[in-house]
Amino acid sequence: MLRLKIEKRLTPTWKVVFSVTVLSIFLAFFVIGFIFLGYGINPVKAYIEILIETVGNFYGITQILWQSIPLLLCGVGLLLAFKASFWNIGAEGQLLMGSLGATWAALFSGLPDFLLIPMIFILGFAGGAIWGLVSTVLKAKFKVNEVITTLMMNYIAMNIILYLIHGPWKGEEMKGFAYTNSFPQPAWLPTLGMSYIHWPTLIMGLVAVAVIYLIISRTKLGYEVKVIGQSQKAAKYAGISYFQTIFWVMLISGGCAGLAGAGEVAGVHHMLRHPDQISLGYGYTGIIVAWLARGNPIVTILTSLLFGAIYVAGDVMQLSFGLPFQIVNVFTGMILFFLISSDHLMRYKISFRREE
Amino acid sequence: MEWQLWIIETLRRALAYGTPLLLGTLGEIYTERSGILNLGVEGMMILGAFTGFVTTFVTGNPWIGFLMGALVGGAASLIHAFLSINLRVIQVVSGLALTLFGLGLTGVLGRGWEGQPLKVSLEMFSVPYLKEIPILGPIVFTEQNVLVYIGIGFALLLWIVLFKTSWGITIRSVGEDPATADALGINIPLVRYLCTFIGGVLAGIGGAYLSIIYRPSWTQGMTSGMGWIVIALTIFSLWHPLMAIVGSYIFGSLFYLSFRLQPWVAPELLTIMPYLFTILAPMFLNVHRTLRRRMGAPAALGIPYSREEE
Amino acid sequence: MQKRDAIISMKGITKTFPGGLKANDNIDLDIYQGEIHAVLGENGAGKSTLMNILSGIYRADSGEFFLNCKPVQIKSPKEAISHGIIMVHQHFRLIPPHTVAENIVLGLGTSFLSPLKGIEKSIKEFNEQYNLSIHPKTRICDLSVGEQQRVEIVKALIRGASILILDEPTSVLTPQEAKELFGILEKMKKEGKAIIFITHKLEEVLEIADHITILRKGKVTASMPSDQIAKKGSEAKSELAMKMVGREVILKVEKESFSLGNTVLEVDNLKVLDDRGIEAVKGVSFSVNRGEVFGIVGVAGNGQGPLVEAITGLRPPSSGSFTVKGDVGYIPEDRLSMGSVGDLTLAENSILTDYKNSCFSRHLLLNLSYIREYAEILMIKFSVVAPNVNTRAKQLSGGNLQRLILARELSKNTQLLVAEQPTHGLDVGSIEFVWKFLLEQRKNAGILLISGDLSEVLSLSDRIGVMFQGKVTIFESPFSDKIEEIGLKMTGF
């Protein structure tokens, strides 16, 4: 008799992790195919078209790189927070507050031209970091669940920006529209050649990856993060201060999201505008970018590129097939579903055994 | 005398504004009482809102709209139930995925429906005789829609079931200590599936309320964080259906005030009020340590249960 | 005794756990009506596994059950209950915030709208029948441990238990409570119920059991009526003990004595509150000197936890004081989630309590190569068996993990070592290893040993403090003529 044998294994090998991850992504594409069918679109043709328009030509690739910048910054920051088991769902709000800080630097700081861009990044980082630290204090000092606070802070950030662009910061040159004035030219981030890639932010992202990689693997803070993330009891036993550790974690995590926001306003829009336009849900997608990287900051480079590609694919679907851009969220939600399901299955080794 | 009328009007409108929150919170109370943490309320509500709207639009009957909203919300919750109960995934992430999925899917499917007003809705009405009662009459029994009373009815019913019946004992026990309930022959997955489903159904009705009664139309992302406020309200009401009435109406009045105070304060800043309150309320609650300990979260909340590994 | 048919018999029960541990190996057991059947064995002998199988919580890999000679299947707790087989677990299966009545009716299938109706009457009947005093409306969390146990028994009786399994029922009871329990069991026996009594205490078994079965390493090593043993006297007893533990019951530990050094811990009238804000340590004074093991022994839950947490700085005392000279090493009871971090490597775990030390980290950075070398040395010195220092802690066996923790805590410049249940759940080899090292370590430090195992404390300690309900009574060596007195103090006499 052939019998299905299921054994537990403690740590899945990286090969298993990789193939299961790829499989989840493909499964998500497969299911989404039915939405295409529902719209009367041949999914195979659609996917071929999408492939050509994204990775199939130079312009598409620059678009992917461009879209992956905020995803990389949000994702790698979130990865650090998740490593400490701090469920920061608030990268979206932190990104928006970063864009707010950057806008202030660009429009109202009155700094000399050569200081504008550094100040945009500094205040962008500060905006995101402060926003992240609010939830940190609430969690560490008042034991308020961070999932709820970081999320509520997203909505608060969104409304603050709406208030500013409809009220005090509304630009005179923008008749009737709720935008701020355009940033002065010296506050625009330079872009690579003819593409949209605002390279200073891209470099920030890569630096963030390197720094967070070093923090996790080589520093005392990283050690503390890993212990807290695994067992708070052990952390207490080891004499690790929860508040201090999470403080630094969220300073960096929020700061990275803030940098992403600064990059979006100074590198793409050159003004502060409706939050839905500043961020296409980068903060939320960043959660999956981080989750997919499975604790390894270097891998966020790959995962953010993947989701950058999905965003560009979303654009393609919008332009070529008239599908709404929201399809990107369906993708990400679906991939997340398959991924966490496979997480469980990966812990089992399934084999067939012949039995008498 | 004008300020008194003003307060009465605020409270009266609080019932209407608080009802979707109440429905969602009651559902989440049941889900969490059975030990499942479903952070996908936002996703289930928006799915309920969309299907409720479309069904009402097509059939012209809001009741069928509510029914479909409930069913779709319930169906969505079953995804979370399957992942949490059978696959034992991290429930926080599964709930988030459900929210993303719901928001995305309704965004995709709902694009053609935006901006079309709903021609039929549920009538507002006053209850004869009862509306004459001083204070209570003008608040509760004047110009309300029937869902307000259904919401209160649900709260009472679910309170009785949870605290006065054998099912209630079973549900609470499963959320406190599934191993014990299991040893006494309780079917843990069944109880958890049912409670998660109730959560989805009620979130679906709450969502449908938004698109059928609250603003009889469909807008992408129209739940605007209400699902998250529901999560906070569940904690705020200490997992008690009657406390959920109080909490929901407090938030309802905040929503109403954020419209009413617009001549004096910028609307965006007023919109922040409920979100801010959501953060601050549990903070005060947690400072009160004895209260937290005696009526804290179900002990097994968010922890997957399996029999052989202890 | 006339020949009867067993009410339940188990044949060839075998159970292997995913880790490869064979907890039950081809076990046969016959249980008769109106009889108290004791199942004896050490920790890890497979008693609890066997009973979990009988009560449907685990499923056996192979084996059969016969209820009144008819083959039956027991696949779930529900099925076990329907056969009248009910287990009272060592850790009670009661829900603390719920009332007694709510706990009793759970899963009973009482009326939907008034589930508690009728229960109060039944509880009253049982109260009268067995001389109990259970109030249906009290919350479980407000009851004493003994009262909770009686609620468990009533819970079983109301479900129509004909075969009652009690897992280590006396381990949490005071001697008086135990006596009352035995009274209840005698009454149940007279009514024709079969009682399975799981324990590792030989003495109490001789007092109450009709039949004794001994398990060791998952196998039955002896099974006989207890009057046979009583007749034969003390020789039979020590033979039984041998069958149970497979070695001398009281270990003779080679123990050279050291001259006492300076005082490393001075505790003065210390009071500590527990998590619920209740005073768990009620004014305790003692001191520990270098060169000695001071053993604190007591039944779990008498304030040992909060006392240790206070001394190791994890919990602020409410009043009183203590002074510690030099560094404190601490071996926590909870090896898996406190003493080590499962997903971190052995190298990372080897510096858990000392990572701020300047040789492991300078400024912000960790000295990774030194940490690896250090871990390698520790592993060799303390013979920790693992592939390499990058192995994850969760892949280690309990004994190896404890060696690593021991190595870490002893290798700091430790003046005081607090060892909390250091051998709990370990195999014999590891136990001896741990004991040897604790004794050797007296050269450099004072050892505060906290344990529930009297024989461990007796074998290792130079002085003993018995902890009962938040207070400590101190005994000086030699202990050989005080063992009885110490045992009584542990139970509150």
Image (tube, rainbow, N blue to C red):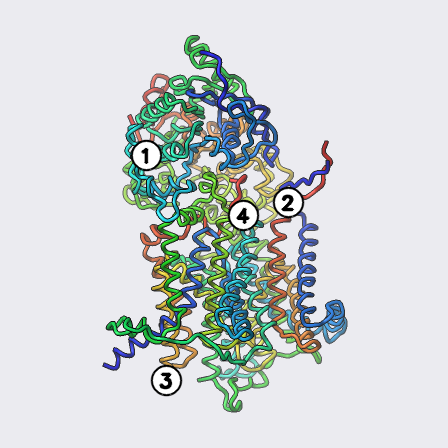
Q: Can you identify the residue that label 1 sits on?
A: C147
Q: Left or right: B303 with respect to B294?
A: right
Say which of marks 1 and 3 sits in front. Answer: 1
Residue B112 position in % (x across, y down): 60, 77
Q: Which residue is mark 3?
A: B263
Q: Amino acid under label 2?
A: Tyr
Crowding around mark 4 (Cα neighbors within 10 Å: few <14, some 14 to 19, many 20+) is: some
Q: Nearer the viewer, residue A151 or A300?
A: A151
Residue at numbered disc 4: C360
Q: For the residues labelled 1 and 3, say whether their Cβ atoms are less than 8 Å apart.
A: no
Residue A303 on image: x %, y %: 65, 62
Pointer 2 local density, CA inside 10 Å: few below 14, some 14–19, many at least 20: some
Q: Quadrant of residue C272?
A: top left
Looking at the rendered image, the quarter that the N terminus of chain B falls into is bottom left
- Report helix, strand or loop for mark 2: strand
| Comparing labels 4 and 3, the label whose residue is closer to the camera | 3
| Distance (Cα) linking label 1 and label 3 | 64 Å
Q: Tell which subunit mark 4 falls on.
A: C
Q: In the rendered image, which quarter is residue B184 located in?
A: top left
Query: Alpha carbon of mark 4 to alpha carbon of mark 1: how far?
Result: 52 Å
Do the dots labelled 2 and 4 sit on one chain? Answer: no
Tell me the kind of residue under disc 4: Phe
